[in-house]
């Protein structure tokens, strides 16, 4: 195994891998002491450890948006690499680098080298090996392409993939390395890896055959004492999970993350699945933890300070997504006569922007992967007769893009033998529309950027009614005489709702009055002209994320899954566009829902023209 030159020069004395059957308690070797062979006195001078962290890279190597086909100076591990090398140079002998998952999925580059050509070494393995990571915690998206792809990636990286709560379902044994202990600057740093148990909700069963995902909090309670017994002076939890709440209305302000977590007026629920985001609870309830390196929630969290049950203060940080930030934790450790311990701690985020250059080594080693992916997504696959508006323009009125996604899902379900009553889908991004004229694979992928698969489910009218009402939580309360200055300001902020959690339905007639408070906005809900009743049965097309309760839509988990697709919805979209050249937005657009007040005309009529569907009852 060959490491970069800088990695071979670091004075890191040991790496202890702990597996299911053995515990390596002695990782340093030395000659037996004797006359004339006494070891030198231990240097107990206080020292500073640097922990660097990436998370949710989602196969973003280059500062490039494969979905828009444009550069993006604010992302990419090639740029993060420059920051890593700069920070490592400041403390070269005492720096460790970690990642907290969602690494091998997310862009067409990840899709191509998982599903189209999985023969070469994975591009993320190539990039990360150049940087010399100490360890990586598994993310939920690591399982999107199945265990063969994941295990191949695992074999290609020069560092362990950690997942203490990922167990073999047959006997409960460890399926992945649970933790490592790295000795650096004479200090033993233990790193425990955990992943959100939401994997079982979101992932196709065939991709996680033979695995179970245990509760992260209980797993940490089990393993941290073992790590201390194995000699860990400092305990770091690297977890693909984040805080279960976020600051109300000010999450972009670093100071807002420092307010008392017990003050409910300062924090808003994120709409988590049970156990999905337990980072704060681990910091508070697991004795002996010093640092939480978190991910999954796609937020820049410079630092949170949380009080542990043992009276200590635990530091928590998260570096956002796509290589937009690098987390930098500074730990001053001191010797108490028996072992090292954290005396003071601090953290900050380094931002990737126009001023950060790409690292030449990472760029050169992965350029061919990038070029192949760009050529792949630029293939022409179809044509349209007009623009299908996306973003807010596609969400704020019953438009053709939402209808197109639902038509695709309905047809895919029909091909599988299921004639659905209705479909629901979302417009994920704000800067992409399906263009008029030639359509490329990149265009198709741009309107469905996630690797969701398709489910057919049976639900009842009660589930549907609750989901439709919750859907309107996406918006703030609107005053028609004083509309928000920008389209984005029409969204709710306390709590904020992700764009992919506003669903557009087909074949039901429904509407919202946004002048009313959340929870009482649905004006009508009908199917084939009749009011929906609670016991009415519906067969629906829905993506796997929403079917599993993702986004807080737990009511869908009460339904019954009838079928799951092997292909992603994104691939169904591309196939439909290829099979239906000359696609007309007006023909695709079917009017079945209303939104009042009108948020389309004042913002978008001048750009896209008047909307076909504004007043439908």
Image (cartoon, rainbow, N blue to C red):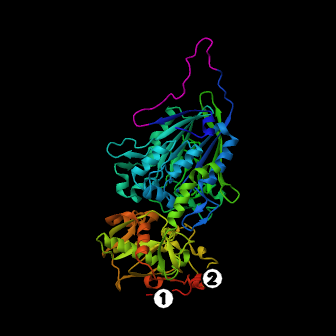
Closer to us: mark 1 or mark 2?
A: 1
* Disc sitting over residue 615 in the figure: 1
**Residue 304, how many percent across, how many down?**
61, 52
- Residue 33 on the magenta span: yes
Residue 482: mark in rendering: 2
Q: Say if residue 150 shows up in the picture.
A: yes
Query: Can you tell which mark lies on residue 165?
Result: none
Q: Where residue 316 sits: x, y (%)?
A: 58, 49
Q: For this rendering, which residue is in front, 325 or 531?
A: 325
Alpha-carbon neighbours of circle 1 within 10 Å: few (<14), some, or many (≥20)? some
560 to the left or right of 483: left
Neighbourhood count class around disc 2 (C-alpha, 10 Å): few under 14, some 14–19, many 20 upward: few
First in sequence, mark 1 or 2: give its number. 2
The extreme left residue here reads 417
Image coordinates of residue 128 in percent, x first then y, are 56, 47
Task: Characterize the magenta stretch by its predominant secondary structure.
Answer: loop
Region in magenta: 19-39
Q: Is residue 350 left or right of residue 538?
A: right
- At which x and y percent is residue 228? 51, 34
The quadrant of the rendering that contains the C terminus is: bottom left
């Amino acid at each position: 195994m060959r490491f970069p030159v800088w990695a071979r020069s670091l004075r890191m004395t040991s790496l202890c891998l702990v597996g299911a059957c053995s515990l390596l308690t002695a990782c340093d070797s030395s000659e037996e002491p004797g006359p004339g062979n006494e070891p030198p006195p231990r240097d107990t001078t206080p020292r500073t450890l640097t922990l660097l962290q990436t998370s949710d890279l989602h196969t973003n190597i280059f500062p490039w948006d494969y979905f828009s086909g444009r550069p993006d100076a604010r992302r990419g591990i090639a740029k993060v690499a420059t920051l890593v090398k700069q920070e490592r140079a400041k403390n070269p002998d005492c720096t460790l680098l970690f990642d907290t998952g969602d690494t091998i999925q997310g862009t067409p580059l990840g899709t191509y080298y998982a599903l189209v050509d999985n023969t070469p070494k994975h591009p993320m393995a190539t990039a990360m090996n150049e940087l010399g990571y100490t360890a990586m915690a598994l993310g939920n998206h690591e399982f999107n392409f199945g265990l063969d792809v994941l295990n191949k990636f695992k074999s290609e990286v020069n560092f362990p993939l950690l997942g203490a709560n990922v167990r073999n379902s047959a006997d409960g044994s460890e399926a992945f390395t649970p933790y490592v202990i790295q000795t650096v600057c004479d200090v033993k740093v233990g790193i425990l890896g955990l992943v959100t148990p939401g994997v079982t909700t979101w992932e196709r069963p065939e991709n996680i055959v033979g695995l179970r995902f245990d509760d992260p909090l209980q797993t940490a309670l089990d393993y941290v004492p073992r790590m201390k017994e194995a000699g860990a002076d400092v305990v770091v939890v690297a977890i693909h999970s984040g805080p279960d709440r976020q600051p109300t209305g000010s999450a972009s302000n670093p100071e807002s993350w420092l307010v008392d977590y017990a003050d409910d007026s300062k924090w808003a629920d994120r709409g988590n699945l049970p156990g999905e985001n337990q980072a704060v609870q681990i910091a508070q309830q697991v004795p002996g933890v010093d640092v939480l390196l978190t991910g999954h929630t796609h937020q820049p969290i410079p630092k949170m300070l949380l009080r542990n049950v043992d009276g200590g203060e635990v530091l928590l940080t998260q570096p956002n997504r796509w290589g937009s930030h690098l987390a930098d934790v500074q730990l001053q450790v001191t010797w108490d006569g028996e072992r090292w311990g954290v005396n003071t701690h601090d953290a900050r985020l380094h931002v990737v922007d126009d001023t950060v250059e790409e690292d030449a080594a990472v760029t050169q080693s992965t350029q061919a992967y990038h070029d192949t992916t760009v050529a792949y997504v630029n293939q022409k696959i179809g044509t349209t007769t007009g623009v299908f508006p996306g973003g807010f323009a596609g969400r704020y009125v019953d438009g053709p893009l939402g209808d197109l996604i639902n038509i695709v899902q309905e047809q895919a379900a029909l091909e599988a033998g299921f004639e659905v009553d209705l479909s629901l889908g979302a417009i994920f991004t704000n800067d992409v529309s399906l263009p008029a004229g030639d359509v490329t694979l990149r265009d198709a992928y741009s309107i469905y950027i996630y690797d969701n698969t398709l489910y057919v489910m049976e639900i009842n009218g009660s589930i549907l009614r609750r989901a439709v009402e919750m859907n309107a939580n996406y918006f703030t309360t609107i005053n028609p005489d004083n509309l928000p200055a920008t389209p984005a300001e029409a969204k709710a902020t306390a709590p904020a709702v992700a764009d992919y959690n506003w669903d557009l339905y087909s074949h039901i007639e429904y509407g919202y009055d946004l002048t009313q408070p959340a929870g009482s906005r649905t004006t009508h809900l009908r199917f084939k002209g009749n009011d929906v009743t609670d016991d009415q049965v519906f067969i629906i097309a829905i993506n796997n994320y929403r079917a599993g309760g993702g986004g807080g839509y737990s009511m869908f988990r009460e339904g019954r899954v009838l079928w799951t697709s092997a292909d992603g919805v994104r691939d169904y979209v591309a196939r439909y566009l290829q099979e239906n050249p000359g696609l007309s937005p007006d023909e695709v657009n079917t009017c079945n829902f209303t939104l009042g007040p009108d948020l389309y005309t004042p913002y978008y009529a001048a750009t896209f023209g008047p909307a076909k569907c504004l007043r439908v009852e």
